[in-house]
Amino acid sequence: RYSKQIKGRRTQNRSALSVAREHSFLYISLITIMAWRSSGTTNAEMVDKLKRFGVISSDAIESGFRKVDRKFFVPKSNEDMAHLDQPLKEGNVHISAPHIYGSALEALELIPNSPLSFLNVGSGTGYLSCIVAEVLGPRSLNYGVEVHEDVVEHSRASIEKWKNVREKQITGGKRLSPTSAQAIKRAINDAAPHIEIIHGNGLQISASSGESVVGFDRIYIGAAVERENLPKITKLLSPGGVLVGPVDDELVKVVRIG
């Protein structure tokens, strides 16, 4: 069962919830800023335009976009289009347009450098999960569930490439002695955001075991779901938790208020 794999440490005091308890949710329809003009020749230029056209507004989200280059996550034959404001797809590997992710990330109400837990249902390339990880920081928990095995392999490889570049940026690309290199690597790993991609069906995650018992503080739905299936995911929210995702071709925000 996929839910058994979603386990982790908690750095905040919070008691387990009763699964049988009645929950209340607030549903909000979001208006996505359909920029389509936030394209650039580099990641920096793409982010500049996302900011200029009002797709992203918070400093934390902007910083996350700048630290996670989209070029590491696009389908392999699409690297030359990595910074265009358009979706890219090859086989099962699909990455949404940057402005879609920008709107969703702003709506998730992420708290920088916090112990929030995050679940990405239909995590795809892992691009959005990495941006969330940069925003939330190393104390957070970050899980992605993806149904296609080839996409899981693509996302894990992409995340590894991004982490390697991230490590080089921190060390300045300098050649270090073995002792210094090991010490720095340990420090980098300790400060690295936690990201785990799991192969499975996000609609089959049980709310009665593993990390799901406590619930997730933030959830993003990376693949469109029918409204009738939405309760299978909203039940995984913790009290006060926020979910954002496409439901019946509409971007929806759900807040658990009870």
Image (cartoon, rainbow, N blue to C red):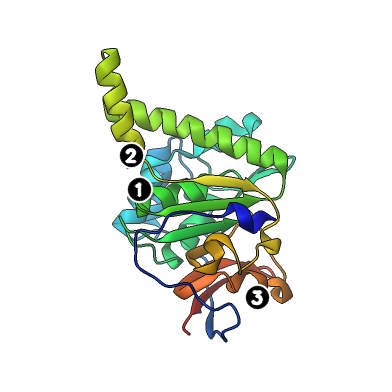
Q: Which residue is mark 3?
A: 231
Ranked by sequence position, the earlier of labels 2 and 1 is 1
Q: Nearer the viewer, residue 63 or 230?
A: 230
Q: Earlier in the sequence, mark 2 or mark 3?
A: 2
Residue in view at x 34 percent, y 64 percent: 12
Instruction: Please name the residue that numbered disc 2 is placed on.
Output: 190
Q: Residue at 53% of width from left, 86% of height from top?
A: 24
Q: Is residue 198 left or right of residue 42?
A: right
Helix, strand or loop at label 3? It is: helix
State the image coordinates of residue 5 (x, y, percent, origin top left).
60, 52
Q: Given this view, does label 2 or label 3 mark the residue nearer the observer? A: 2
Residue visible at 67% across and 41% down?
Answer: 151
Amino acid at circle 1: Pro
Closer to us: 140 or 25:
140
Residue 95 percent coordinates (x, y): 60, 46
Q: Residues within 10 Å of mark 3 (few under 14, many from 20)?
A: few
Circle 2 crowding by C-alpha within 10 Å: few under 14, some 14–19, many from 20:
few
Q: Is residue 35 visible?
A: no
Mark 2: secondary structure? helix
Q: Can residue 109 be seen in the rendering of this structure? A: yes
Nearer the observer, 129 or 46:
129
Q: Are marks 2 and 1 in contact (CB under 8 Å)?
A: yes
Provide the residue designation for mark 1.
138
* Image spot of residue 194 (x, y percent): 43, 46
